Image (tube, grey):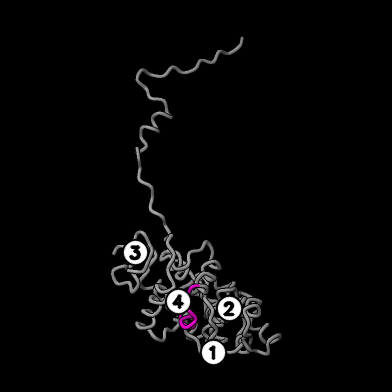
Amino acid sequence: MAKITRKPVPRKGAVPKKTAKAALAKPNAPAKKPLRATKRWTPAEVHEAFSRFRKANPEPKGELEHVNPFTLLVAVVLSAQATDAGVNKATRALFEVADTPQKMLDLGEERLRDYIKTIGLYRTKAKNVIALSAKLLSEFGGKVPRTRAEIESLPGAGRKTANVVLNMAFGEHTMAVDTHVFRVGNRTGLAPGKTPLEVELGLEKVIPAEFMLHAHHWLILHGRYTCLARKPRCEVCLINDLCRWPEKTV
């Protein structure tokens, strides 16, 4: 005998699910504010912003401690997904015993791990530092190369690493985009972009050459200490009147 399936009879006064959900939805909910600024800066405004950065801090310095281009390269490789303060704490002792590619190789991967074990991903980073030291000796005469492509060919070194080394060690007008520069570029509207490369190229396009040597340090420091990720300090921001962020608090 075939089984008879009966559709449930709705209770008197019951509201269908779709209707109930619709009833709970807030009518005419206001649209969310855009996360990015949309209006572009004028060249005069960009010049004014970096003039203020320069006046406040004429000679900004990177916060990664190093003694030569090699130790700078190592410090930047170690800094991926780590804080500069955490890297410095580990490298102070490390660079006392291994400040050249040959000394780093002599130290060896296992002992290197002991120096940097407080840094995230230290096992992979130790392997990369030993490998890049070997490559510097075998292909570059033990010297840090001076082109982006050559630096990027080293284990553990990407575009940001190359830009930092080229700028800090060799005075090139490069723009290293870390999480702070990426945030500032997008939030202020100075150089919005979906990727670090887009922001990098955008900043290089709008920042006058006279500011490019120190520009990435000014932007990093601004993002690290003023334009904070969760609660930006708009009240003390040097460029709050120029900033295009729709949610700024001043």
- Image quadrant containing the C terminus: bottom left
Disc 2, SS: helix
- Image quadrant containing the N terminus: top right
Mark number displayed over residue 245: none
Q: Quadrant of residue 231?
A: bottom left
Q: Residues within 10 Å of mark 4 (few under 14, many from 20)?
A: some
Q: CA distance from mark 3 to mark 4?
A: 23 Å
The residue type indicated by label 2 comes to Ala
Front: mark 4 or 2: 2
Mark number displayed over residue 162: 2
Q: Quadrant of residue 218?
A: bottom left
Q: Does 243 sit left or right of 114 as displayed?
A: left
Disc 4 designates what residue? Answer: 86
Q: Nearer the viewer, residue 53 or 177?
A: 53
> Principal SS element in the magenta part?
helix
The residue type indicated by label 3 comes to Lys
Magenta span: 206-215
Disc 3, SS: loop
The residue type indicated by label 4 comes to Gly
Disc 3 designates what residue? Answer: 231
